Amino acid sequence: MKKIISILLIATMAFSQLITYAADVQELTITFKELAKIELSDIAEISIRSGSTGEGVIISSSHIIEDVLNHINTIELKEYKDTVGGGRGGWSYSVMFGLHDNSSIHYTCSTGMEINNTKYEAIDDTEVRGCLGYYYNLYKCINSSEWATNIIADAVKFGIISADNSWNFPSSICREDFCNIAVKMIESAGVILPTENPQRPLGIKDTNNINVLKLYKSGVILGKEQHKTGVTFAPSDFITREEAATILYRMSKIMGIGLGVVRSEVVYYWDEDKASDWALEAIKYMRDMKVMEGVNDYEFHPKGLYTVEQAVATMVRLYNKYITQNNEDEEVLFKAEQMTLSDVQKLQNLVNEGHMNWRTVPELVVKAFVGYKTNKDAENGKIVELAGDSERCSVKFELDGTTYNLELVRPIDKTDNGVWVVEAFENEAEKEIFFYVPSIEKTPVVKQDDGWYKFPEKVVALFPFPSFHYEKPISVTAIFTPTGTEMDKMAKEIAKIELPYSYHSMAEALNMEISLPSDATRGHLFFRFEFEYGTVEDSQYFNVYQE
């Protein structure tokens, strides 16, 4: 009897150990990207269906398909194990990826997917549910013609119009609303419109709309009638097709989007003779750019009215052309302190051809540059100090309580037509990062009179989180580059911290000890902040040295 009890005890212990071992073994997971093995170029369209209503929407916008794919690609799935009395509950949204080869891949939130006769369920698909729900509801509230639905959704994504159902898209659009959409598009693309223009000392008499005034000051609109005390605009009048084409044409000019000289001698439309003389070049230019074409291949209907959805569609096309053209030129347009002479010449040539005239105005260059560097709306900032001549100037620019110092130069053309280039940029308040020597007193590292920080053997960085809008970085990396070397090639990671890390206040020392390389004497130190969803921000550069 004792022998039997001993055998049972041993068996029980062995079984217990087996359970413990099994509990310690983690289930294998696989991402949707690894499982589905589809790329953006494989997808023709997607369909999102709601579990609440049973209704679906079909999406062919490549921008939105890419966003959905990026969200779903990273979710982790595990093989579904059915249990007696178990079973998965209801679903919220599902998505079907329709591929160019006429096959499809389905995923249903909360219940998972089946591929190669195997069922999979997600570990957590909360973010995917949110993404699918947002786009499903967006498409359901767009009351447009069928041809315009996807391009209107793109406009919402780009920030050109708001995501609500306040627009009656098939209806005619008035001149003021057309201007509102135009300014939103221009500013969403990152182009700064001038608010003052000495050539336009008089204002508009019949509207105080700030967007109309911006376009008037920049020369995009001229008004209906000229008066000694100003111009009238007729904001409530419906805009005609030739008026819309002309405004789009001038917008393309200030955004630096160009195709060269329009073929004025070529007849584009049978009804060209019905167009106003001032509109004909713009009508042809917009057709060449494929931004705004005729009502058919042969007629433009210059005096006909323009609809809201047509206006939005042309704005999106112009926005896409600007982004496509300027993606490769981003370094030239904004990272001005790193420009080569050929970069400056390229920029000057654009201005000489009538594009981007704001580049000749220091205030507008400063606003564009500070806005790009800080990822803030710099329109409400102001220049508090400006000194210099036609070749070089120093600027103090104040934005949200912080003062920025900029040095601007005109490297090639030093006349009023010459472009301004940012040579140096500094955040005077240096609110992003502070340093201290790790000790009980937390002795600060003081900036020397020559602008350099003398570093002890080890220091600790101090990060005030309000500069990140209360969003906590998932990692912080300290990067050092010796002076006199190529910044990118010689950059060296010298310290890094990742979540989870402790903090006690909104301006918190993260116990991130920084030691400069032993052979370093002088160099530049900056910090790279990585946020969830892949966003990366770099701090300003700090000049540091050690003896």
Image (cartoon, rainbow, N blue to C red):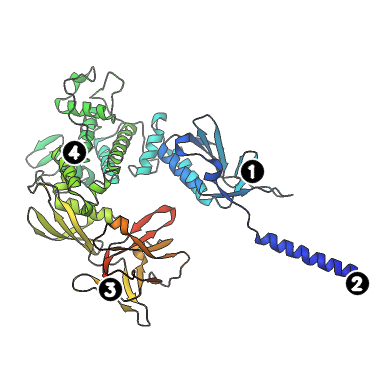
**Relative to the observer, which residue lies in front, 295 or 375?**
375
Upstream in the sequence, badge 1 or badge 3? 1
Which image quarter: residue 115? Answer: top right
- Say which amino acid is labelled 1: Lys
Q: Residue 119 shows which numbered tag? A: 1
Q: Select label 3 or label 2 by which is in front.
A: 3
Per the image, label 4 sits on a secondary structure element best described as loop
Tell me how far mark 4 sits from mark 1, CA to CA.
Answer: 58 Å
Per the image, label 2 sits on a secondary structure element best described as helix
Crowding near pointer 3: few (<14 within 10 Å), some, many (20+)?
A: some
Q: Residue at x 28, y 73 (%)?
A: 546
Q: How many marks?
A: 4
- Say which amino acid is labelled 4: Val
Q: Position of residue 307 (x, y in %)?
A: 31, 31
Q: Residue at x 40, y 29 (%)?
A: 147
**Relative to the observer, which residue lies in front, 182 or 37?**
37
Upstream in the sequence, badge 4 or badge 1? 1
Regarding residue 173, the answer to whether it shows in the image is yes
Look at mark 3 in the image and give the residue it sits on: 546
Horizontal side, residue 72 vs residue 386: left or right: right
Tell me how far mark 1 sits from mark 2, CA to CA.
Answer: 48 Å
Q: Position of residue 361 (x, y in %)?
A: 14, 49
Look at mark 4 in the image and give the residue it sits on: 220
